[in-house]
């Protein structure tokens, strides 16, 4: 490929074909092709606007997430006047990846393309592939064949209508997806090539395998293939194909050899080293599911990492403020409960979220037990002495209760054979392992598996220093901003319930779009006029709803993958909507009809199975 000259001074990229609102503070811009998307993404990155939280390219769209609704106008104006990035910004990284072409589907794929296996290998290695966007899993990149042109070529293509060069490959997905595809498998599907960064189910046609490490949280950036990266595959001929056991042992030896350097990088990257943390609470009984959550890991959507973080953000803020922490400090998020914890040092805690009882079994008999009813237990700082046992009862209404500890949770110490992502010590059975922040956050992403694993009995919570924190208030201050809006939604939208009602009815505000025009006004009217029921298989990835299927016009049931946001109401072919939670996939191929407000998402975090929901327009 010849290196084109940089665009002349004053050259600008064409404005997007359309710009759609995607919730309270995000925009989805449409472009004619992947080349235009990547050029626009490079231009925005070069400008580095201070109010931009995340920038996620996809096949023909670019998502820009701001900090608040007030940012939408400036983001829209930015897209209309993007300067073409210079050659340095648009060139992209080039990587060479060795592949052993012995995939189970190699022969079948070759036949589908009218080639021999050797010709397919030659074509695959002869093409220059470009990472168009991430998704599916952290580190998974959708690679498109052919050189994506630089900014100057994009400007010319937008002017003369020639578009992006290079014909796409068209390989159908397998009719029956595999239940497990090994890490490093190289596959083809539709017009894309992809490499599985970890073992997972999948329906791509497998043509080979690589030892390249696609995703490493100790690396900067953690993804090997970021959007815009050019990739050349090289054929590697193995003398003999290794058995699964031998291959696994080889990978284990390689990972073990890399541990010292990774630990050094990881420790050096921590803003607050775990060495500065101290034990505070021991988990005696975790309940159904006990996770560490904080404000999340924003800004990683382009490499397939969702924000994650506490589902009920208002509760996170209230619990942290009640103990004097910063409002995004890590807390415990409990599903259902009950949870039992033992204090190891004098500390202060507070519970927020779903209402429920709170009991402290004191070791000092003269003090006696503390038993708080739901109304008393909320957002109230409680002092614990060493060996006191705290019992967080199951919710009397809702799903999730959050526990903040003064100093903020900084990590967890556990005895385990597998420390998991973020481990900083010990890898053998019975060793003490400390799990800390991953990509700047302690949040457990239940879809990707990033962050410390769910807490178990015997785990010890490590907290940060308390000096310099705010004083513990007599009571947590009243709600402001999103929290006040959340309470207003409760007050104005909750239906009257008889004492026998098992679950509440909620009114949730939504912003239409980004694909309301594609699905049509009939679908949007049906969404807002239906009383939906929360299904039992809802989780942090998505709140699944039952009710009459939404009408989906022919041809509107799927679209090229594009970025999504928390609260996105995705409409799959079944017509039954799914509201994305904090652990949602970063991209998806089903249209999003509307997006729930941040305060509305807090309400859905507490919507137990059987709860009924009505969506109302936010504006």
Image (cartoon, rainbow, N blue to C red):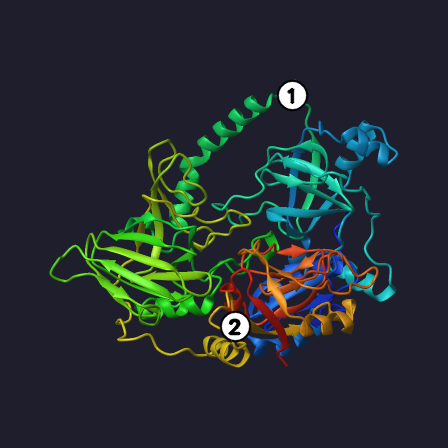
User: Which of labels 1 and 2 is toward the front?
Assistant: 2
Front residue of this view, candidates 519 and 223: 519
Q: Which residue is mark 2?
A: 599
In the image as oriented, which residue stretches furthest toward the top? 240
Position of residue 70 measured from the top left corner of the image (x, y, whole percent): 57, 79
Front residue of this view, candidates 125 and 542: 542
| CB atoms of marks 1 and 2 within 8 Å | no
Front residue of this view, candidates 51 and 192: 192
In the rendered view, tell whether residue 395 sits above or below residue 72: above
Q: Is residue 60 visible?
A: yes
Front residue of this view, candidates 279 and 2: 279
Q: Which residue is mark 1?
A: 241
In the rendered view, tell whether residue 3 sits above or below residue 419: below
Residue 46: which disc?
none
Which quarter of the figure has residue 579?
Answer: bottom right
Q: CA distance from mark 1 to mark 2?
A: 54 Å
Position of residue 202 measured from the top left corner of the image (x, y, whole percent): 67, 41
- For the residue labelled by badge 1, is the local secondary structure a helix, a strand or a loop? loop
In the rendered view, tell whether residue 134 sits above or below residue 36: above
Q: Is residue 50 visible?
A: no
Q: Which label's residue is closer to the chain start, 1 or 2?
A: 1
Position of residue 459 measured from the top left corner of the image (x, y, whole percent): 33, 45
| Residue density around tag 2, few if under 14, some if 14–19, many if 20 or more, within 10 Å | many
In the rendered view, tell whether residue 480 sits above or below residue 274: below
Relative to residue 556, is residue 73 drawn left or right?
left
Position of residue 248 measured from the top left corner of the image (x, y, whole percent): 54, 27
- For the residue labelled by badge 2, is the local secondary structure a helix, a strand or a loop? helix
């Amino acid at each position: 490929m010849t290196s084109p000259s940089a665009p002349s001074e004053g050259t600008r990229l064409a404005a997007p074909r359309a710009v759609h609102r995607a919730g309270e503070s995000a925009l989805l811009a449409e472009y004619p092709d992947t080349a235009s998307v990547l050029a626009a993404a490079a231009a925005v990155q070069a400008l580095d606007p201070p109010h931009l939280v995340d920038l996620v390219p996809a096949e023909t769209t670019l998502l820009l997430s701001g900090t608040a609704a007030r940012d939408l106008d400036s983001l829209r104006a930015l897209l209309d006047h993007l300067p073409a990035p210079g050659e340095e910004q648009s060139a992209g990284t080039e990587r060479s990846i060795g592949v052993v072409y012995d995939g189970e589907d190699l022969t079948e794929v070759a036949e589908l393309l009218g080639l021999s296996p050797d010709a397919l290998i030659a074509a695959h290695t002869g093409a220059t592939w470009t990472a168009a966007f991430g998704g599916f899993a952290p580190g998974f990149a959708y690679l498109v064949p052919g050189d994506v042109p630089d900014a100057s070529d994009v400007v010319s293509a937008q002017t003369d209508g020639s578009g992006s060069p290079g014909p796409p490959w068209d390989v159908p997905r397998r009719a029956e997806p595999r239940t497990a595809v090994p890490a490093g498998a190289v596959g083809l599907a539709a017009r894309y090539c992809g490499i599985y960064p970890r073992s997972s189910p999948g329906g791509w046609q497998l043509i080979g395998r690589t030892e390249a490490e696609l995703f490493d949280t100790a690396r900067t950036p953690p993804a090997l293939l970021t959007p815009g990266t050019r990739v050349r595959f090289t054929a590697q001929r193995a003398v003999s194909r290794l058995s699964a056991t031998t291959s696994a042992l080889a990978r284990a030896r390689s990972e073990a050899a890399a541990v010292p350097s990774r630990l050094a990088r990881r420790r050096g990257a921590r803003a607050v080293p775990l060495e500065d943390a101290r034990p505070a609470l021991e988990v005696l009984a975790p309940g159904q599911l006990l996770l560490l959550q904080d404000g999340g890991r924003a800004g990683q959507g382009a490499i397939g990492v969702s924000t994650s973080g506490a589902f009920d953000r208002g509760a996170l803020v209230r619990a942290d403020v009640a103990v004097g922490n910063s409002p995004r400090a890590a807390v415990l998020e409990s599903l259902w409960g009950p949870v039992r914890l033992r204090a190891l040092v004098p500390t202060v805690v507070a519970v927020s979220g779903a209402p429920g009882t709170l009991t402290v079994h004191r070791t000092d008999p003269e003090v006696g037990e503390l038993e708080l009813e739901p109304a008393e237990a909320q957002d109230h700082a409680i002092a614990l002495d060493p060996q006191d046992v705290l019992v967080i009862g199951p919710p009397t209404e809702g799903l999730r209760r959050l526990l903040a500890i003064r100093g903020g949770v900084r990590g967890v110490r556990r005895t385990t054979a597998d420390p998991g992502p973020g481990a900083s010590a010990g890898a053998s059975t019975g060793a003490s392992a400390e799990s800390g922040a991953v990509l700047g956050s302690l949040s457990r992403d239940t879809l990707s598996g990033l962050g410390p694993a769910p807490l178990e009995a015997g785990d010890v919570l490590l907290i940060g220093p308390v000096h310099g924190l705010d004083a513990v208030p007599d009571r947590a201050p009243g709600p402001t901003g999103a929290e006040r809006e959340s309470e207003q939604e409760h007050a104005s939208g909750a239906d009257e319930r008889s004492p026998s009602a098992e679950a509440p009815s909620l009114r949730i505000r939504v912003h239409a779009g980004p694909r309301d025009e594609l699905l049509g006004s009939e679908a949007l009217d049906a969404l807002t006029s239906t009383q939906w029921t929360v299904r039992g298989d809802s989780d942090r990835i998505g709140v699944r709803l039952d009710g009459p299927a939404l009408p989906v016009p022919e041809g509107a049931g799927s679209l090229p993958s594009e970025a999504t946001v928390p609260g996105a109401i995705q409409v799959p072919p079944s017509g039954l909507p799914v509201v994305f939670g904090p652990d949602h996939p970063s991209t998806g191929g089903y249209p999003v009809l509307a997006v729930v407000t941040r305060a509305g998402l807090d309400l859905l975090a507490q919507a137990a199975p059987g709860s009924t929901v009505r969506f109302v327009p936010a504006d």
